Amino acid sequence: MKLRSLYLITILLIASLLVGVISCGTPAPEPTPTTAPPPVEKPVMVIALDSDIDHINPQEFRSDAGYHAVANLYEPAILQVLVPDPDQEGVLLGIAEYGPGMATEVTVDEENAVITLHIPDGLKFPNGNPITAHSFKYAYDLAFQMPTSYAPVLFPYMGLASHEDVVAVDDNTLEFHLEQLTPLTLAVMAFNPFGALDEATIAENATADDEWAAEWLRRNSMSSGPYVITEWEQGVEYVFEPSPNYWQGEDYFQNSKVILRVVPSAEDRELLLRQGDVDMAWGLPYKNVDDLKADPNVEVYNVSTTRLFYLGMNNNLPPFDNKALRQAISYAIPYDTLVEEVFYGYAQKATSPIPVGMPTHTDEFWPYDTDLDMAADKLEEAGYPDGLDVTLAVRMSVPWDVEAATWIQASLAEVGINVTIDRLPDAQFFDQLNGHQLPLFIHDWYSWGNDPSYQLSFLLKCGQFTNYADYCNERVDELIETTAWSLDAAVKEAGMREAQQIIIDDAPWAFLYQPDLIVAGSKGFTGFAVVDDQLLRFAYMGKTTE
């Protein structure tokens, strides 16, 4: 039996400064209680978000703001490791390592595919109920059995067949009996849907029609994470305060509380930041980034990510069931213009369904640099020598999607493809997207698990509900299956290279761009943590002193 143990190394971000005053000549007097300096007060951090919290049930799909909230309310037993960004002070970057958190020891039995977590005594929910191995076991039970939960689709990627294979041996011991270890086993265990849950609280709020208290969870939490919500004003603001029983203690928090304000207008978010009325603004226009960097009262951070935007073409709906037409559109996209004019250089061109920054990415098979002559040839091959009319759906809430659509419209017009842009409210866009009713659309995706097989299985596998282009290639499916659970790097590399070559030739999408993640804070803002899920982690956020 081969055993490997991982032990907790807790890295705390310390924001306070020790200031000593030394006088020359006369020795300083002995300190007395009356002369002791008062404790340094931690700041209240105010964040302007571009979307509202729809709900906070950790098991259900939700708005972007809802995901940010849940990431700070629920905490899994193990965590992604964060390290300081060597290029940007005040930034922490998640790396491809996952170590203990509340679980102080993780033992991996590779021969038998069993992972054992040690949960120490003394952990508590905010209401004082104990957090034990049973609390984490219950989270997997609920995730698997709640009818509206999306979490079961994650189980195979960690090698877990059923919630019944998660066993609480006793209060301190949690075992995962896996079908096999996978490249994402530990990464998925660190996802926030698997944060500890209090079974007693769920039972108190369950009903005959809702045995898992799904509706209660949408507006209430039993936080196992660092924060609790103390005020909830829908569409206006939400107040998060440090959980009194959080396991890392009060020194972990670099603020006294966090206020999330819902500010739909990007212009208003920027104005509030420049005026000093908020400490951080999320989702600011890329065209203003350089000006913000020049403002002495603003701190700007930009980080490359694996978030991929694409022009989806539904392969089941005419005229996009025509491969040559999809290739024609791909040749007609003004890629470099989009990067420079929409993102002002804070993006990179996408050349594959596997983004830059994800293992096995290659641009070797990319042929679609803007070529209007080739686009015209492919259009004729597709049977549309005189062009055609199409409608492009975009979210009106995403300004760069709308801007990109106008540039795409102009470029496609040069080869006879007349594009009507349909700017849709989010609810209408997603209703049609999830119904696979949009023939042509701009959408984006980033994978919480930075793995190419995981990425492709969600986006381009036959029949997958998030495969909004309804692309289907049996060989690609075989390659996904072959590589998804393989720990052999050579198998992964070879399989994903072939998959990229096939997909790029089939052109189910036009691959557009990977924008940088931009965050702007007030002067002295620090503690921007970039985890694989790209969700804000409030506890690190604070202010430096002058």
Image (cartoon, helix red, strand yellow):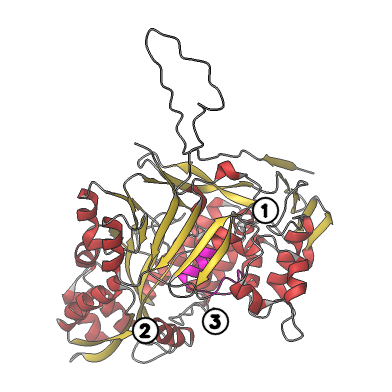
Residue 17 position in % (x across, y down)? 45, 32
Residue at x-position 70% and y-position 44%: 104
State yes or no: residue 429 in magenta.
no
Q: Which residue is mark 3?
A: 463
Q: Give the magenta part as a residue range.
A: 55-69
Marks 2 and 1 close (CB-CB < 8 Å): no
Residue farthest top in this picture:
25
Residue farthest front in this picture:
34
Q: Which residue is mark 2?
A: 425
Q: Looking at the image, is 135 positioned above or below residue 326?
A: above
Look at the numbered disc 2 and give the secondary structure of its residue.
loop
* Mark nearer the viewer, 3 or 2: 2
Structural distance between the alpha carbons of marks 1 and 3: 33 Å
Look at the numbered disc 3 and give the secondary structure of its residue.
loop
* Mark nearer the viewer, 1 or 3: 1
The residue nearer to you, when weighing 414 against 371, is: 414
Visible in this render: residue 68?
Answer: no
Residue at x-position 60% and y-position 50%: 79
Residue 504 position in % (x across, y down)? 37, 70
Marks 3 and 2 close (CB-CB < 8 Å): no
Residue 180 shown left or right of residue 231 in the figure: right
Q: Which residue is mark 1?
A: 77
